Image: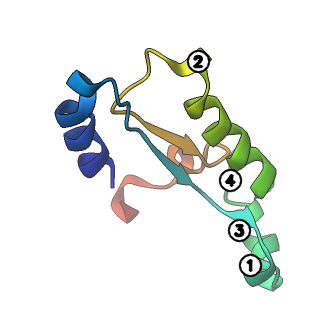
Amino acid sequence: MHTLARTFAAELAPRGIRVSSVSPGYIDTPAFRTEAQAAAAGLVAAGRVGTAEEVAAVVAFLASTEASYVNGQDLLVDGGLINVIPAAML
């Protein structure tokens, strides 16, 4: 997805269109509310899973004028999960 976002960002920038992507980690949703959620929270550097509202806030930021100079980026909304996953698992 990130490569697609970067490609579209480069192609559409001359038209004034910005493209970025959002990569959420473990997010508390009805489908994820299981015993696995507690185990997943222990893997996240923040010590908890995220909320849909936290992901929505990042999307709202990207759509705002405050992000007018952000283009072709992938914003991780994962509570630091990617930083604690062993390299062998990536």
Q: Rounded to the nearest whole Å, what is the CA distance between mark 1 and mark 4?
A: 15 Å
The residue at 24%/34% (across/down) is 12
In the rendered structure, the answer to whether residue 29 lies left or right of residue 79 reads right
Tell me the element at label 4: loop
Residue type of the residue flagged with mark 2: Thr
- State the residue position of label 3: 40
x%, y% of residue 15? Answer: 26, 26
The residue at 37%/53% (across/down) is 87
Local packing at callout 2 (Cα closer than 10 Å; few below 14, some 14-19, many 20+) is: few
Residue type of the residue flagged with mark 1: Phe
- State the residue position of label 2: 65
Local packing at callout 3 (Cα closer than 10 Å; few below 14, some 14-19, many 20+) is: some
x%, y% of residue 45? Answer: 69, 45
Q: Are marks 3 and 1 in contact (CB under 8 Å)?
A: yes
Q: Mark 2 vs mark 3: give the one in front.
A: 2
Closer to the camera, 10 or 26? 10
Q: Mark 1 vs mark 4: give the one in front.
A: 1
Local packing at callout 4 (Cα closer than 10 Å; few below 14, some 14-19, many 20+) is: many
Q: Quadrant of residue 89?
A: bottom left
x%, y% of residue 1? Answer: 33, 55
- State the residue position of label 4: 44
Residue 88 appears in the picture as rendered: yes
Residue type of the residue flagged with mark 3: Ala
In the displayed structure, 34 sits above or below 4; it is below
- State the residue position of label 1: 32
The residue at 19%/31% (across/down) is 10
Residue type of the residue flagged with mark 4: Val
Q: Mark 3 vs mark 1: give the one in front.
A: 1
The residue at 59%/18% (across/down) is 65
x%, y% of residue 68? Answer: 49, 17
In the displayed structure, 70 sits above or below 32; it is above
Say which label, 3 or 1, has the lower sequence index.
1
